[in-house]
Image (cartoon, grey):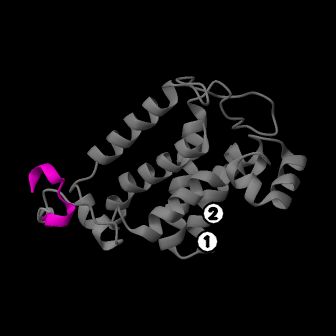
Amino acid sequence: MLAGSHVALGAAAWMALAPHLGRPPLDAEALALAVAGGLLPDIDHPKSWVGRRLRPVSDLVAGLFGHRGVTHSLLALCGCGWLLQAGALPARWAEPLVAGYLSHLLGDLLTPAGLRLLWPLRGTWSLPLCRTGSPFEPLVVALVLVAAWSTLPERPDARAALHRLGLFIAGATEPAPPPPPPRRHKVADMPRSQV
């Protein structure tokens, strides 16, 4: 899947998981970490969004393991489990990061290229619902987003969350500002035929 799809899937994974952990689903810090986790597995591809930004690390990982190698395998899943259990990071960081990471793996599992879960063995696993970059990919991602939103026990007011972030959207929660008063024309501004 493309980077934008992994961003959306990482956010969706956190929105669905957060209430079960007693955390707010629209917490900005947690969403950012989930999005980062959603992009992180592609560190093994130097031309990916994250690979271009961390080029030396990406070149090293790609050279040692290849794309969709260790970062897309059961070893990576074990690493996620260790990160949660060992307390290497505070839970408030580890939980959304791992949720995003797992969403990436599930997203790639839906493409024909699939995952090499048993890396270093060669076989791949996939449930090929959409090709990377195909017109069907955004539809699959949109369906996952709707499903994640619908699983929330209490749907938060997205407008209130945007308002807290300083991104106010006028709508049903608050009235739109009144329109500006009509501009009065001065006699000098009017065409001669109206004077």
Residue in front for this viewpoint, 56 or 186: 186
Residue lying at 37% horizontally and 60% vertically, measured from the top left? 18
Residue lying at 73% horizontally and 37% vertically, measured from the top left? 118
Up/down of 6 relative to 165, above or below: above
**What is the quadrant of the N terminus in the image?**
top right
Marks 2 & 1, CB-CB < 8 Å contact: yes
Q: Judge left or right: residue 39 versus residue 140.
A: right
Up/down of 93 relative to 14, above or below: below
Residue in front for this viewpoint, 192 or 153: 192
Residue 177 seen anywhere in this rendered image of the structure = no
Residue 102 seen anywhere in this rendered image of the structure = yes
Q: Mark 2: which amino acid?
A: Trp
Q: Mark 1: which amino acid?
A: Ala
Image coordinates for residue 140, horizontal then vertical, percent: 45, 31
What label does residue 82 carry, if any? 2
Residue lying at 33% horizontally and 40% vertically, measured from the top left? 147
Element under disc 1: helix
Image coordinates for residue 27, horizontal then vertical, percent: 38, 68
Q: Which residues are magenta?
A: 184-195
Q: Judge left or right: residue 183 versus residue 156.
A: left
What label does residue 86 carry, if any? 1
**What is the quadrant of the C terminus in the image?**
bottom left
Residue lying at 60% horizontally and 30% vertically, measured from the top left? 133
Q: Is residue 72 magenta?
A: no
Quadrant of the rendered structure where residue 146 is?
A: top left
Task: Rate crowding at label 1 as few (under 14), some (14 to 19) or many (20 or more) other CA atoms within 10 Å.
Answer: few
